[in-house]
Amino acid sequence: MKVTLYTDGGARGNPGNAGAGVHIVDERGTLIEDVAKPLGVATNNEAEYHAVIIGFEKILEHFSMEVGHLDVTLKLDSELVGKQLMGSYRVKEPRLKELFMHAKESMDNFRSVHIVCIPREQNKEADRLSNLAMDQGL
């Protein structure tokens, strides 16, 4: 089975009031779950990683019996986080290293994870959810 995970994180101020947005659909485009989670104070990059981790956790909740057979496509508009998870960029920031390791460990639960950096215009739902989460965190 194939699942597409769209994620976005943001912070108003850097660091500042942060939120994570997650939009998960199956291979037919049917909505599995939307998440808007306030994160408190965090940087933009920390919020991006939290969104990825939350997304993987939600997929595990929905497909606990099939996780080893799932192919996940992660779509995000953060080039930094995407390239770090693909191994193209190094993770230097200590707080990001911890989140990076958590995200990488989460990826090991699936048969495959394909990471695609997309333009912000193609990530509107996750962006909307991230902004909603930041609004809720005020």
Image: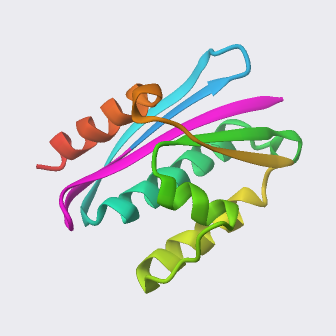
Q: Position of residue 122 (x, y in %)?
A: 47, 27
The residue shown at (62%, 15%) is: 30
Task: Look at the image and give the residue range highlighted in magenta.
Answer: 1-20
Left or right of 110 in this view: 75: left
Left or right of 67 in this view: 137: left
Question: Vertical placement of 115 versus 104: above or below?
Answer: above
Q: Nearer the viewer, residue 3 or 60?
A: 3
The residue shown at (46%, 43%) is: 77
Image quadrant where one finds the N terminus: top right
Quarter-wise, where is residue 75 in the image? top right
Question: Vertical placement of 31 versus 135: above or below?
Answer: above
Q: Is residue 3 magenta?
A: yes
Q: How many marks?
A: 0
Q: Is residue 11 magenta?
A: yes
Chosen colour scheme: rainbow
Magenta-colored segment: predominant secondary structure: strand
Q: Position of residue 20 (x, y in %)?
A: 37, 48
Q: Position of residue 47 (x, y in %)?
A: 37, 58
Left or right of 63 in this view: 65: right
Question: Vertical placement of 45 versus 79: above or below?
Answer: below
The residue shown at (71%, 13%) is: 28
The residue shown at (78%, 61%) is: 108
Quarter-wise, where is residue 46 in the image? bottom left
Q: Nearer the viewer, residue 63 or 128?
A: 128
Q: Position of residue 9 (x, y in %)?
A: 37, 49
